[in-house]
Amino acid sequence: MILFKRSEDLHHWVLEQKNKGKITGFVPTMGALHEGHMELVKACRSMVDQTICSIFVNPAQFNDPKDFEKYPVSTEKDIQMLYHAGADIVFLPSVEEIYPHGQTGLETYDLGPLETLLEGRYRPGHFQGVSQVMSRLLKLVQPDHLFMGQKDFQQCLVVQRLIEIMHLPVQLHTVPTVREEDGLAQSSRNRRLTAEQRKNAAAISQVLSDIRGKLSSGDAGELLKQAREKLDAAHFKTDYISIARASDLQPLAYWNGKEKAVALVAAFQGDVRLIDNMLLN
Ligand code: AMP
């Protein structure tokens, strides 16, 4: 496994691989790695010749500076995990390597309604930040395949749109969410939960499973009400819970029983913000 810190060195290596006709895959992460990330690496390895992973906590996508400061960092352990998972390259850039001209005046992208719905509504600027870092990384890495987690469902839709806007010849693969035994989606943020919050946190996937089990065509309002109540009872402070069209996340007040639908939730347990989602059909 080779570790690059400089964009130029990574780019040089990438061009060499292209010349050799190697198929490359890319797994971008913010570190504090867990089994969910390893699943992405596994999916990537099964499809490509060279697996490139990045670890970069992107300041541009944190609308709350406190959240950025508190983001867990475990680089040594991450590198070991990636080594054992069989990654070929780890890219560990500094902020200056990613944003050599600073973070102001970066390009903005027309993400359509996805930018201001759900996560976008509660985290203004977040998806522009995601697009800015992904645009930079994708230009550098030029992967044939890109692997991202369904856990961040809206992020996958945003990145797919970015790929289309930029006309990049890369195929995005969405990998199913890896969960703990009680259903909690694995997340770097789970490390910040107290023992009691960790117990409460299981409610978030339970409400999604309930919706999936109970959804039938017609009005979704009652299901959402029950879900909110269950989250309240587990001491969650809910930002949103939505039943939406899977293709563009427009809310489905009335479900026709056929359209591909997804339930999405974001809620705070203490000061830890958790998100999760489930496909409903
Ligand atoms: P992050 O480090 O949180 O930016 O996540 C890096 C990538 O891992 C993103 O594509 C996430 O969607 C994905 N990911 C995070 N948690 C999980 C999980 N529990 N299962 C599958 N993929 C995940």
Image (cartoon, helix red, strand yellow):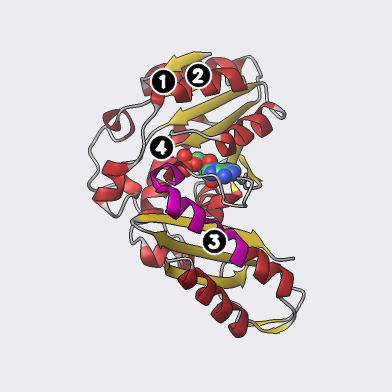
Q: Dot 3: what SS?
A: helix
Q: Residue drawn at (67%, 26%), measured in percent from left and top?
A: 45
Label pair 4/3, CB-CB below 8 angstroms: no
Looking at the image, do the residues carrying marks 1 and 2 touch, with CB atoms under 8 Å apart? yes
Q: Gap between marks 2 and 3, in whole Å? A: 31 Å
- Of labels 3 and 1, earlier in sequence is 1
Q: Nearer the viewer, mark 4 or mark 2?
A: 2
Q: Residues within 10 Å of mark 1 (few under 14, many from 20)?
A: few
Q: State the CA–CA distance, disc 3 to disc 1.
A: 31 Å
Mark 4 and mark 3: span between their CA atoms? 33 Å
The residue carrying mark 3 is 204
At label 1, the amino acid type is Glu
114 to 177, vertically: above or below: below
Ranked by sequence position, the earlier of labels 1 and 4 is: 1
Local secondary structure at mark 4 = helix
Quick one: SS at disc 2?
helix
2 and 3 marks in contact (CB < 8 Å): no
Amino acid type, residue under disc 3 in the picture: Ile
Q: Which residue is mark 4?
A: 136
Amino acid type for the residue under numbered disc 4: Arg
Which residue position is annotated with label 1? Answer: 76
Q: Which residues are magenta?
A: 190-207
Q: Nearer the viewer, mark 4 or mark 3?
A: 3
Q: Nearer the viewer, mark 2 or mark 3?
A: 3
Res 80 label: 2
Pick the residue in front: 71 or 174: 71
Please state which of residues 95 and 76 is positioned toward the viewer in this rendering. 76
Report the side of 175 relative to 54 (left or right). right
Closer mark to the observer between disc 3 and disc 1: 3
